[in-house]
Image: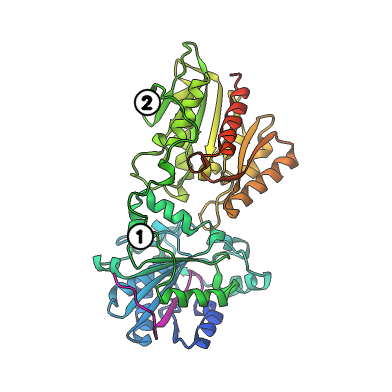
Amino acid sequence: MTVDTGAEAAFVLVPEAYTGDWVWERVAAALRRAGARVFCATLSGGRPSGSADLETLIEEVIRQVDAAGERVVLIGHGYGLLPALGAADRRRDRVIRVVHLDAAGLPEDGDSALDVLPALPRPVSGTAEVPPPTREEWHRLGSTEGLTPAVLDQLAARALPQSAATFTQPLRLSESAARIPRTGVLCPADGATIDRLRWMASLGDPRLSLLTEPGNTFLELATGHWPMLSEPELLAKALRQAAAGEGESLALPPGHVPHHLRPFVLQVPDRPRERMEHVDLYLPDAQEGRPAVVFVHGGPLPAGIRPTPRDWPTFTGYAALAARLGAVGVTLDHRLHAPGDLARAAEDVSAAVDLVRAHPKVDADRVALWFFSGCGPLAAPWLSAPPPWLRCLAANYPLLEPLPGHGTDGDRFRPAAAVRGAGDLPVVLTRVGLEDPVLDATVERFLDAAGECGAEVEVIAAPHCRHGFETLDHTAEARAAVREALGRVLGRLGV
């Protein structure tokens, strides 16, 4: 794959759902001041409202590409990436690079927008149009960080309904579409960072393997989902950088050992384990029923990764250590493969808990649940109505509310709302100092809510540790944090 310099390339800008070419006005002006030619797709297709489908929008983008000339950089914002990719595939002789602008998911042949963008609403059966979000609902598409109230008012006032078929019709791509160079421009306020994508690539996510190829690059803009409205000058600069092939690569060096597969921070002797369905139990030496600690891995994680999380050193290390100290340590696999899978993953966790409590070597009345990283929202149902056998709930560097644009509304998976029902359930929270600010802000909001209702939260501070410190930071502070957190949880179980 060759990297084009981007010299004299024209830009074709494809907007997010419900919007039009007007969102690009300030970015287009900045690009033109820098000497670029700019073309903006409207995504209306010139058809009556409700009659367009994805093919209609692809045709509109193709018209803009043809008008732009022989060398085109094609930018798709959010949903706009789908028609952008469709047009790029059919104009491979003209499009030198596709820019994914804060576009969740990586559409492949046969995917519809609903398959890769969980924030989009499902069209009501029999309706031709999907109404735009209200002013209070725009965060569902992505973070509104950086938007002033006046700009948010304008966004809501100018939005138009989207034809339902533009969301449901599958995208068709040829195999050669993968050879078009890509640049991702990420907006970390939505939770997407280069470091996180690189980690996801290290998991073997097949949808990210394409983006690790030479010539594909990534940039970050410190703002929300609407950089053309919040930071138009910075976005214009980033698009010029993308056109020149600048940015970081996701490629991993030869022999790279992914962070999650590095050794556990403590040396723990191996323990016998019993495997049942999607659950492993690490058993202590005692013969009588012992309390159990259920360790719930984070996510979303791609389906099919090997080894699965219950065999990762962090979880086998914690579980074996718990067993060595006299409790049953439990690891499990759940199906949090996409942001919209929280309900399914919650069912998996509940089923695992039932399996554990029914085991003859487990004291069913003394169980703790311990949540890690992106599975933090799964703690909410247990906080809102703790059963009497749940003696402690723990969380390490957790995400404690669904991120904007991830398609989850209501309070079912929002621990800050659920903690009002926690009563006297003790919570042990390990908070790392070198955390992603977006994740740490959710922890801060949870702690504020817990303080307001008087919930019992014990915070273990690890100021010099990173997210996933159990395999990343082999330091005295990391070892102390593991010992202290496990000691407090086991103490609540009477171990």
Q: Amino acid at mark 2?
A: Met
Residue at mark 1 to residue at mark 2: CA–CA distance = 36 Å
Q: Residue 124: within the magenta? A: no
Verify whether residue 16 appears in magenta.
Answer: yes
Q: Position of residue 100 (x, y in %)?
A: 43, 67
Relative image position of residue 251 (x, y in whole percent): 37, 58
Q: Which residue is mark 2?
A: 276
Q: Can residue 391 be seen?
A: no
SS of the residue at dot 2? Answer: strand
Where's the N terminus, which quadrant? bottom left
Choose the circle earlier in sequence order: 1 or 2. Answer: 1
Q: Is residue 345 visible?
A: yes
Q: Which residues are magenta?
A: 1-19
Task: Specify few, some or many for label 1: CA neighbours under 10 Å numbering under 14, 14-19, or 20 or more.
Answer: some
| Residue 159 position (above or below residue 66) | above
- Across and down, in percent, residue 58 comes to 35, 74
**Rendered residue at 59%/38% (across/down):** 477
Q: Quadrant of residue 216?
A: bottom left
Residue reaching furthest to the front = 476
Dividing the picture into quadrants, the one containing residue 126 is bottom left
Q: Is residue 395 left or right of residue 317?
A: right
Mark 1 lies on residue: 212
